[in-house]
Image (cartoon, rainbow, N blue to C red):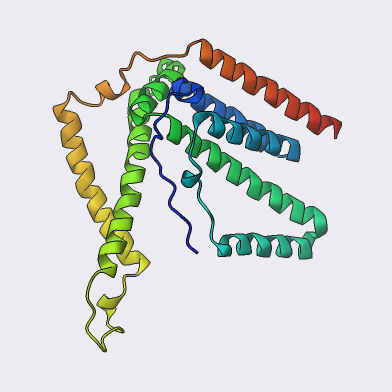
Amino acid sequence: MTMRTVPLRQVPGDSFVHRLWAGTKLLIVLILGLMTWALPSWPALGMVAGVVIVTALIAGIPLGAIPRPPWWFWGLIGIGVAVNASFAGLAGALVFLRATALALVLVGSSILVIWTTPMADVAPAIARLMRPLRWFRLPVDEWAVSIALCLRGLPMLIEELRMLRAAHKLRPVARGRTDHPSAEMGILDLITAAMSSALRRSSEMAEAITARGGTGRLTAHPSGPGRADAVALLAIGVACAIAITATVLL
């Protein structure tokens, strides 16, 4: 069984989560990441996982969008648990499981932001959040545009890899020549072809951005936080306080 590709694009909807400002979602992911990094306890990880699950339910994310890892993924986790248990006992195995759970919940929260946020709103939100850095004459707009374009180009790159792999499988192979180097595409060949296509797409995107007035228009967006964003941040703050209290008491 292979792992199904996660659709790294916005899932349509008009829920409370979809209406939140993009900067608020980025702040929530940052807060959750910092808290679980500084306090990687089971209550904190459970709180973050609960926030991700509840948010996905509120946003109406379909179950088909959730990836199903293949058997070898769980096999690698099992091997990691066994190796850590053999060297450090039960405590080492628990530390490894906490680290794995931390990585999974952070990846899940980041993907959830992509599912519920239009990519056009990311660059203005990042530019607004990093506005204090302008006092130090740092290129905030350029950083925001670079991050937004990377997020926008990631789904395109994944789709390009899938198309290259599918096109290679459709190539006819002469009988008795299956051992020829052209009969199989290695990972380096796939990456090289994808990089060539990405360079071509980036050149076309740069020309399109220049024709539409440059990168300044990508960060010039009037959106901002509202009451719903304050409610969401307050709820996250309460959840973090509960998780910290539970960690201290336990």
Find the residue positioned furthest to the left: 211
18 sits left or right of 217 in the view: right
**x, y percentage for residue 216?**
26, 22
**x, y percentage for residue 109?**
54, 36
Find the residue positioned furthest to the top: 227
Relative to 163, residue 213 above or below: above
Relative to 139, residue 11 above or below: below
Residue displayed at 79% across by 26% down? 245
Quarter holding the C terminus is top right
Find the residue positioned furthest to the right: 249
**x, y percentage for residue 62?**
48, 40
Residue in the foreground of this view, choosing between 210 and 135? 210
Which quadrant would residue 143 be assigned to in this image? top left
User: Would you say residue 139 is visible in this rendering?
Assistant: no
Residue displayed at 23% across by 43% down? 202
Which quadrant would residue 134 be assigned to in this image? top left
Relative to 171, residue 52 above or below: above
**x, y percentage for residue 10?**
39, 34
Which quadrant would residue 36 be assigned to in this image? top right
Residue displayed at 73% across by 23% down? 241
67 sits left or right of 222 in the view: right
Number of marks? 0
Residue displayed at 37% across by 66% down? 187
Find the residue positioned furthest to the bottom: 176
